[in-house]
Image (cartoon, grey):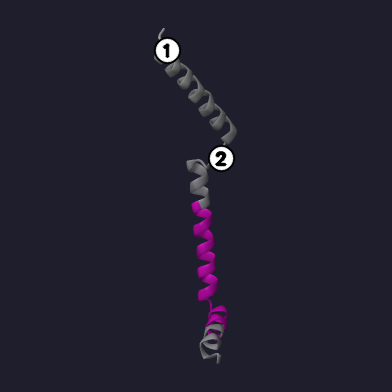
Amino acid sequence: MNTATRLIRITVARTRRRFRAVRTAAGDAGMTTAEYAMGTFAAVGLAIVLYKVVTGGSIGAMIEGVIKKALDAHF
């Protein structure tokens, strides 16, 4: 085996070890497709609830009052 081939094999072996170490250390860092789906459903549910609350009578009037006060403020 010549020197170049030996160096290539050593480099490949080191790269594989590093890759395995990184992959093992990362563990289960990301979400799976099912977790993304559940997160999306939860976000949509929260958006619907917030929309209903904001478009309701008293909350909408309160937000409108706050905006009017902010726009009419004198600096």
Task: Examine the residues drawn in magenta and state their main secondary structure.
Answer: helix
Quarter of the image where the N terminus is located: top left
Residue 59 x %, y %: 57, 78
Q: Nearer the viewer, residue 3 or 43?
A: 3
How many callouts does the rendering have? Answer: 2
Q: Which of marks 2 and 1 is nearer the N terminus?
A: 1
Secondary structure of residue under mark 1: helix
Amino acid beneath label 2: Ala
Q: Give the range drawn in magenta.
A: 40-65
Q: Which of 70 and 45 is in front in this view?
A: 70
**Contact, CB < 8 Å: mark 2 with mark 1?**
no
Q: To which residue does mark 2 refer?
A: 29
Using the numbered discs, state the Cα–Cα distance from disc 2 to disc 1 in whole angstroms: 40 Å
The image quarter containing residue 65 is bottom right
Position of residue 12 relative to residue 47, above or below, is: above
Amino acid beneath label 1: Thr
Q: Residue at x 54, y 68 (%)?
A: 50
Secondary structure of residue under mark 2: loop
Q: To which residue does mark 1 refer?
A: 3
Q: Which residue lies furthest to the front in this view?
A: 3
Query: Is 64 inside the magenta-drawn segment?
Result: yes
Position of residue 67 relative to residue 20, above or below, is: below
Crowding around mark 2 (Cα neighbors within 10 Å: few <14, some 14 to 19, many 20+) is few
Residue 23 x %, y %: 54, 31
Query: Is 46 inside the magenta-drawn segment?
Result: yes
Residue 24 x %, y %: 57, 30
Closest to the camera, between mark 2 and mark 1, is 1
The image quarter containing residue 66 is bottom right
Q: Residue at x 55, y 72 (%)?
A: 53
